[in-house]
Image (cartoon, helix red, strand yellow):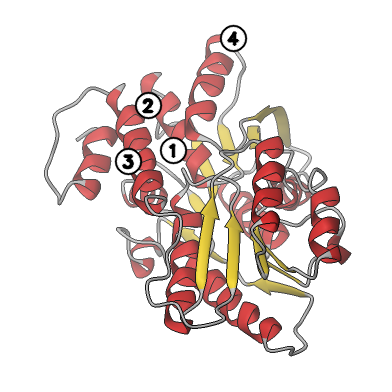
Amino acid sequence: MTICERADERRMDKKVVSAGRAAFILVNVIAICAGIFFFFGPDDFSLNQKENSYLIGASYMTMNNEFYKIIGEEIAHRVEAEGDRLILRDPALNAGRQAMQVQEMLDMGIDVLIITPVDGAGLSDVLRKAREQGTLIVVLDTNVQDSGLADCTITSDNYQAGVLVGEYFLTRQDSAKVIVMTHDATVSGRERVKGFMDTVTKNPNVEIVKEIECEGQLETAMPKLRQCIESGTAFDSVFCLNDLAGVGAAAALDEKQMLGKVKLYGVDASPDAKALMAEGMMEASAAQFPTEIGKEAAEIIYRLLNGENVQKNILVPVELVTQENVRQFGIDRWQ
């Protein structure tokens, strides 16, 4: 069974779809886009709003990643239960658009801003405006450059995610030529890559042969890795800053009959990555816990609204998922 068929089997009630390898990317992109549509159908998720309700605005980096959808749903459930109002915007990895969307929400009078920055350095001006008008700011998943602008920042332990994967890598390979898929605009992406590279380069026989900027996106990672393969770059391992890029890398390797021969590593432990691990096509991924991040964020939002003191920086622990323990995490769902 091809990767495409396994991915479709998970997404379409376990029905096997006979499709070529090229359909793998199309199916994933369609599923991602469907997630955006259904998540962003209504702008306001609160149905039973109370009198004098709070207005909470959210702008995640992109909604073509189910990770953010899960975080958003956890927050939306709490806001709904409190009788408050929630509006969401999707900048689709465009930093300028995100700044404009945040300004629009500030003009609407939001009480709280939930933000996952596309570019950690590009939001300082609009976040200062938010502070000036008394809007509370909760940053999720990756940091803003001026951390003092945030009332609370909640992220996975991104550096440790890279370290965990790197340590496992060293137990599996005495020497290697590694391609690293990066997303340099985000602090989280840089920290994961740094944690991995700091760890694996302790072995002088591990060579980082190329870094490829892919913005953590499947549809960017696949053609860029394909181009790298076609250019004749010699490598035997790929580390991806997230599993969305990892699935794109897997598709490129599969297309070139290299999947299973090249060792593939990632961060997220998404359902697709865990399925690849279960099939022996991916070595390991550091698990993030979007449900926990969302629940923590919702709790922090209401503590801030109640005038309580909160911890400025919260790190959510990560765990290593490998071929050996993947079934303990549940293959068809996020942890």
Mark 4 is on which residue type?
Ser
Mark 2 is on which residue type?
Asp
Helix, strand or loop status at disc 3: helix
Earlier along the polypeptide chain: callout 2 or callout 1? Answer: 1
Between the residue at mark 3 and the residue at mark 1, the CA separation in whole angstroms equals 13 Å
Q: Which mark is residue 31?
A: 3
Between the residue at mark 1 and the residue at mark 4, the CA separation in whole angstroms equals 21 Å
Does residue 42 appear to the left or right of 191 in the view shown? left
Q: Which mark is residue 254?
A: 2
Earlier along the polypeptide chain: callout 1 or callout 4? Answer: 4
Q: Report if residue 156 is visible in the image.
A: no
- What residue occupies the far front of the structure in this picture? 51
Looking at the image, residue 307 lies above or below residue 17: below
Read off the residue under disc 4: 231
- Crowding at dot 3, Cα within 10 Å, few <14 / some 14-19 / many 20+, comes out as some
Assess whether mark 2 and mark 4 are in contact (beta carbons under 8 angstroms): no
* Quarter assignment of residue 326: bottom left
Between the residue at mark 3 and the residue at mark 4, the CA separation in whole angstroms equals 31 Å
